Amino acid sequence: MKRIVIPPYDHYGLSTFVINKDTVYIGHFGGSYDRNGQKLLTIEDQMHQTLINLKESLKPIDLDLNHIVKLTVILRDIKDFKGMHSIWLQHFRADHYPVRTVITSDFVDAHCLVQVEGIAVIDDQKSLRD
């Protein structure tokens, strides 16, 4: 088993990814702020940034969004479902949609509208085993 911690998660005592054989468990990702530190105010902007953040974090382990088999989307408000889904369709190919569950929750950061967590699978041709 391999545990990967990327900032800022190194300050919270948790792993960003845990890789066990060909399965990658993905810790939570959000996107409340853009790359310049500006608050994002809409569900569409936050969902887009969340998936960008996830995509960028997967690159160092040679994965991308097509490797994701399951995502749980956590919304602050279920009324944001339609906006979240519109961005989902922009980031995932129709023939590679992951399984998705959508739930609601409060977040520690009052500004946060969405987070995701999930599971990815490593291709048979690739191996991240130690």
Image: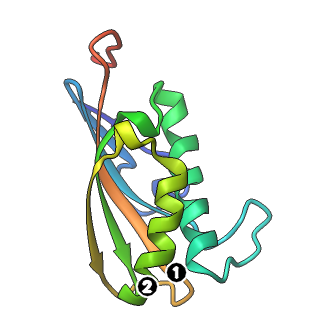
Q: How many marks?
A: 2
In the picture, measured across the screen, residue 111 lies left or right of residue 38, that is left
Q: For the point 46% across and 74% down, which residue is it? A: 114
Where 45 sits versus 87, above or below? below
Residue at the far right: name it.
36
Where 74 sits versus 10, above or below? below
Q: For the point 29% across and 52% down, which residue is it? A: 118
Q: For the point 43% across and 68% down, which residue is it? A: 115
Q: Which amino acid lies under the numbered mark 1 shown in the image of this protein?
A: Cys
Report which residue position mark 1 lands on.
112
Q: Are marks 1 and 2 in contact (CB under 8 Å)?
A: yes
Q: For the point 40% across and 78% down, which residue is it? A: 81
Where 9 sits versus 120, above or below? below
Quadrant in which the C terminus is drawn? top left
Q: Which amino acid lies under the numbered mark 2 shown in the image of this protein?
A: Val
The way the protein has been coloured in the rendering is rainbow
In the picture, measured across the screen, residue 37 lies left or right of residue 114, that is right
